Structure formats: structure tokens, C-alpha cells
């Protein structure tokens, strides 16, 4: 049985076009020195237009473009595999059949690289925030002390407001706070960097609910469509922090440490107690040792609501995480972060407290 000739040509094109794009763009980005003006140009001129365009498209459809794209990619993979199997059977025992089977998967991998990794990778070649802002390097003890001062000050601001003043939690109130959390992330990006003017978009819930939690992930951001998604089963504090974090990605902060820093700084200066509480819970989850370990001095006195929210977040993560899946997801995420230029990989998430201490030491 013969495979139709046009199908085979399409399959070859599906490999060659992304391969060409990948080679040309990766080569050009690699040749320009890290921090070159071309990456700033991408950040200031291309990114905002891209975000506006995807926002305009996204506003017209009632579904998540990222999730539909992921589904389309899976269907394409299945279709190409079927075509590969047919081609392999037609080739019989000749040596070319492994190539016929591999080709669809190579095509998919190349398209994912060109659409999702490459545009983000270009932005990663801007200088890291601490180099651009010349933040001082700190000794470990200085970092610990700065974090303790930070948490104590934020705890005082929450205590002075008083837990009783927090508005009762309703669905409408929660939606408003979610949008405010996104705005906080965006405002912090602007305070740290001359960022493109954008409107906050908030985040969609990832469907199906519980899927990201099983993988041990709070939120996901596919650079192609610039649509932030968060896990629907998060506790409120985690949710606000994740929304502000994803919004910082949308505004062009590629590093996980920088996105966490923007989420914290934005939420910590919010007028709403719930959002400042989310900032403190986020800091506690990332820097429990410096704040509570007696080795660093008497534990910082934190409001009972904050300690309970952090416990609830840990409990949720433990109960919902599917450990084997979460471990492979962490490996995939690590590879993704490194491939797109975040040199710390998944460790980058945990670097944020140190970055916060350095930012404060520079007077931010
Ligand atoms: Zn992130």
C-alpha cells in the first residue's frame, strides 16, 4: 500500500519549517551578547503588542486558547503517529522505517520549541533584574535578618488592621480580589522595571480542576498565548500569590525568582488585608527556616490566620499531589526552564527570598 505523496511532503514540511525557524532564531539570539539592546527592544516593543493581540483574541472566545492549543497538539501527535505507522508499514523492512515513526514526534517537539520555548528564551537573554539594578550581594546572615525584619513589619501591618475587618468571603469578593492580585503583580513589575503598559488580565482556572495540583503546580503560563492559568483547588492565599506571579510573567518577567519577587512586592503593599496576608503566607512558605527556625533567633510572631493559611496550603499540596506525577512534572518543568534560559531551573522559585533581601538592601 502506498502512502499518498502529498501527505509525505506535508510531513517533511512539518519538520523542515520549524527546524529552519529554530536554527535561525536560536542562532541569532545566541550570537547577540546577553543583555544586548535587541532583547530590550523585544521586551518594550514586541511583547506589549503581542500581549494586546492575544488579549484581543482571547476576549472574543469563551475558552482558554492555551488549553485548546494543547489539545490540538495532542490530536496532531496522534494523527501524525498514525501516519507514521502507515508509512512504516509501507516502507516494509527497509532501514528508513524508524525515521517514518520518529518524524511526527520530531515535528511536534520542534513546533513546541518554536512556539513556546523560543519567544520566552529570547526574553531570558535580558540581564537578570539584580544585575540591571546593581543590587548588592549579601551574606546568608544578612539575608536572614532582612527576611525577619520584612515579615515582622508585614505582620504588624496585618495586626494593626485586625482580622475582624476583613470582608466576608463571597464569590464576587473573591473574583474582585483575584483581579486586584493580578494588578498588584503588574504594578510591581512596573516599579522594578520600565515595563510595557498593559491591562491586568487575571487568570483562568486550569481545566480539569485538580490536574495541576496533582502535578504539584500552582499555576501555568504558556508564553505563546500569554494567558495565565491557576489551579482551581488552591487555598485563597496561594491563589492570590499564584495570580500575581503569573501576571508578572505576562508582563515580561521570565525568571521564576523575579515573578515571585514581583508577586510578593505587589501584594505586600496592597490596601486589602487579604492580599497582604497572601504575601506573608507566600514568604513564609518560601522562607520558613529564617522566620521560624530557633537557630536564627526567636521565631517571628506571625498572626494566627497567616500560620493557619500556610498550614492549609501545605495540607492541600500534600493531599492533592500525586507524588510520582509531580516528580516527573518537576523534571519536565526543570528542563523547560533551563531550555528557555532560566539557569537555576526549578530551584529558581526558591531564590526569591534572597532576591527580596537584596532588593530591600538597595533601598527598594
Ligand atoms: Zn512561573
Image: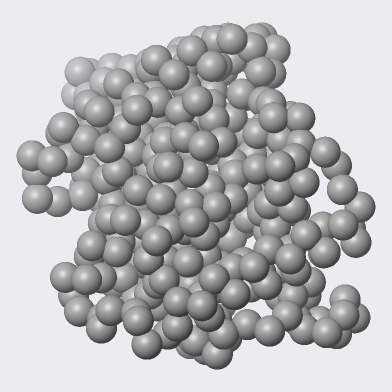
Report the quarter where the C terminus lies.
Answer: top right
Position of 146 with respect to 215 (left or right) is right
Residue 104 visible in the snapshot: no
Give whichever of 100, 327 is nearer the camera.
Answer: 327
Find residue 188 and report its horizontal and vertical position in percent.
49, 44
Q: Which residue is drawn at 59% across and 15% down?
A: 29
Classify 192 as above or below 285.
above
Position of 314 with respect to 14 (left or right) is right
Find residue 292 and report its horizontal and vertical position in percent.
75, 81
Find residue 304 and report its horizontal and vertical position in percent.
55, 90
Give whichever of 309, 31 is nearer the camera.
Answer: 309
Residue 303 visible in the snapshot: yes
Find residue 125 and report its horizontal and vertical position in percent.
62, 24
Position of 38 with respect to 134 (left or right) is left
Classify 174 as above or below 258.
below
Give whichever of 153, 130 is nearer the camera.
Answer: 153
Q: Which residue is drawn at 47% across and 35% down?
A: 190
Classify 234 as above or below 4.
below
Position of 115 with respect to 149 (left or right) is left
Q: Which residue is drawn at 54% across and 30% down?
A: 193
Amino acid at each position: 500500500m502506498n502512502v499518498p505523496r502529498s501527505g509525505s511532503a506535508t510531513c517533511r514540511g512539518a519538520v523542515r519549517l520549524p527546524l529552519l525557524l529554530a536554527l535561525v532564531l536560536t542562532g541569532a539570539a545566541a550570537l547577540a551578547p546577553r543583555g544586548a539592546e535587541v532583547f530590550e527592544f523585544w521586551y518594550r516593543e514586541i511583547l506589549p503588542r503581542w500581549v494586546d493581540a492575544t488579549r484581543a483574541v482571547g476576549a472574543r472566545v469563551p475558552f482558554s486558547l492555551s488549553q485548546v492549543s494543547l489539545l490540538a497538539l495532542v490530536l496532531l501527535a496522534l494523527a501524525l503517529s498514525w501516519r507514521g505507522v502507515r508509512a512504516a508499514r509501507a516502507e516494509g523492512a527497509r532501514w528508513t522505517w524508524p525515521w517514518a515513526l520518529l518524524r511526527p514526534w520530531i515535528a511536534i517537539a520542534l513546533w513546541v520549541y518554536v512556539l513556546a520555548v523560543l519567544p520566552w528564551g529570547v526574553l531570558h537573554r535580558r540581564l537578570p533584574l539584580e544585575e540591571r539594578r546593581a543590587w548588592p550581594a549579601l551574606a546568608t546572615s544578612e539575608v536572614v535578618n532582612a527576611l525577619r525584619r520584612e515579615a515582622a513589619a508585614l505582620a504588624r501591618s496585618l495586626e494593626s488592621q485586625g482580622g475582624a475587618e476583613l470582608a466576608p468571603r463571597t464569590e464576587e469578593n473573591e473574583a474582585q480580589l483575584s483581579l486586584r492580585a493580578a494588578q498588584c503583580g503588574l504594578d510591581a513589575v512596573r516599579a522594578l522595571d520600565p515595563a510595557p503598559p498593559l491591562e491586568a488580565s487575571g487568570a483562568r482556572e486550569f481545566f480539569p480542576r485538580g490536574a495541576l495540583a496533582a502535578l504539584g503546580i500552582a499555576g501555568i503560563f504558556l508564553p505563546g498565548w500569554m494567558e495565565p492559568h491557576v489551579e482551581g483547588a488552591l487555598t485563597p492565599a496561594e491563589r492570590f500569590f499564584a495570580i500575581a506571579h503569573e501576571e508578572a510573567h505576562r508582563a515580561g518577567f521570565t525568571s521564576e525568582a523575579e515573578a515571585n519577587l514581583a508577586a510578593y512586592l505587589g501584594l505586600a503593599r496592597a490596601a486589602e488585608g487579604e492580599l497582604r496576608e497572601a504575601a506573608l503566607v507566600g514568604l513564609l512558605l518560601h522562607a520558613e527556616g529564617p522566620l521560624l527556625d530557633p537557630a536564627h533567633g526567636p521565631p517571628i510572631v506571625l498572626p494566627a490566620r497567616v500560620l493557619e493559611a500556610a498550614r492549609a496550603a501545605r495540607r492541600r499540596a500534600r493531599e492533592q499531589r500525586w507524588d510520582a506525577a509531580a516528580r516527573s512534572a518537576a523534571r519536565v518543568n526543570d528542563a523547560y526552564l533551563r531550555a528557555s534560559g532560566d539557569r537555576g531551573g526549578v530551584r529558581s522559585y526558591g531564590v526569591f527570598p534572597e532576591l527580596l533581601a537584596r532588593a530591600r538592601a538597595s533601598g527598594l
